[in-house]
Amino acid sequence: MQHIDHSKKLRDQENTASVLGWKSWRLVLAIVIVAAVISLFFINKNVVIEESADKTQVYQKPEDDMAWGEWFKSLFGKEQEHFNKSYAVVIGIGDYNSDWPDLSAPPKDVQRVYDYLTKEAGFDYVVKLMDKKATKQRIEKLMVEDFPNQVGKDDRFIFYFSGHGTQRKIGNDLLQGYLVLQSSKDTAYADMISMKEIKSWDSLLVSKQTLFILDACFSGAAGIQLKSPLTDKKLERLSQDGHHLITAGTEDEQSIASLEKWNGSLFTDAFLKGIRGNADSATRDHPVDGIISLKELMIYIEDTIDREIVHSGYKNKISPQMFELRNSPGEFFFISEKFKDGVTQNHLNEPDATNPKTDMLIKGNIYYTVTLIIPSKMVGANIMVDGKPANILEESLTVVKIRVRKKDTNHQITVQKDEVSCSKDLFIRQDIDDLTPCSEL
């Protein structure tokens, strides 16, 4: 008779169950981990998609964030003109492998514009193309197929380009402008982007407002050149349809750049400083209001470039240009960094005398004016108030006049140029005429 060790059999069964339990637990754990990784992937793809080196970088705002239009209304009131989303494509060519010299500024320019649109301006969808990614075929697909099918009638759209520009003569007196791509040969115009194509792309977009920003110098741009002065800045007018194009300069001019002075090109640096608030005009007819109209921006860019050219010793003239692509009663506009704190801006249309906050803002009663005396070595420096770009009213060499919002705590005023910075903390109780934040320099 075979002897059966029941205790051993029981132990074997327990061990088997233990092993099976461990395997089952590991399987469940593995499934949970895989599910978590997959869910994180799908969540993150709504924010930023960083694809392989030969593909495209795309930013898409998370679905639970409010669209640009809703964010705009949250700042300026529900009665404002209806907007939905803001789209953009930013393109830069610095590494040319053809007849054109390489440029150091476009990689910096494109990244700065991309960061501004995605991190500060609240844009909903931004595509970034650099160098070999920015093929004509890829750009055409975006502008002929993708964006026309995606952008709606209440949306806004920006096309930004940084790189070489050129032109060719057509007939006796006509010039056609072109944007030069990475592999474009000297006169292989079919491999470039023509202004005729830009005009056609604009016609395919049903967006309420479109702005083409070309940091390149050439003649023969698309549209009708505008030289009109500042018109009224009421948001009611600015919010109407507007389709424009701006360029850094014209034929025989060269856009200048310095990674040390402007962290890229002078035109793009002035553009970014302007739309962050420095272009917000402060004349009697056009008070600081938190909205930067396109015409305000162009005036600021022109003045800044003229001033910086003198300071840098550059001998040639640079003439930024503005063109109208369609009949445009409105203008593309930007919201100043300093007015994104939720202050109601009813005065952007007709002033509301019954609103004390509006009345205070119009009269300037919630601001002090501070005049800074800057050392000569800090001329052209970035001025910050409480970590944000200062609201500059006037600027001339070593004297900078800024506007500072009243509050019950100290302000920190910082002056920074390259690696040198100085700052001063103080409680501002009145207008100040001669503040020297860099007295130690």
Image (spheres, rainbow, N blue to C red):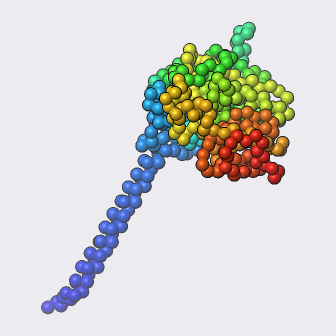
Give the quadrant of residue 434. Answer: top right
In the displayed structure, does residue 225 sit left or right of residue 334?
Answer: right
**84, above or below 200, in the image:** below
Q: Is residue 419 visible?
A: no
Q: Position of residue 195 (x, y in %)?
A: 63, 20
- For image coordinates 66% across by 39% down, the residue present is 368
Image quadrant for the N terminus? Answer: bottom left
**Image location of residue 249, percent across then percent down:** 73, 25
Above or below, comparing residue 204 to residue 2 in the picture? above
Percent across and percent down for residue 144 are 51, 25
Q: Residue at x 44, y 27 (%)?
A: 79
Against 420, is 70 above or below?
above
Decide if residue 124 is on the left or right side of residue 233.
left
Which residue is nearer to you in this view: 300 or 400? 400
Q: Nearer the viewer, residue 89 or 136?
A: 89
Q: Residue furthest top?
A: 172
Q: Is residue 113 left or right of residue 39?
A: right
How many labels sit on residues?
Answer: 0
- Tell me if residue 374 can be seen: yes
Q: Residue at x 60, y 20 (%)?
A: 232
Q: Nearer the viewer, residue 368 or 322?
A: 368
Q: Position of residue 406 (x, y in %)?
A: 62, 43
Instruction: Look at 61% across and 36% down and name the residue there.
Output: 365
Q: From this viewpoint, which residue is outermost toward the left?
A: 1
Nearest the eye: 167 or 418: 418
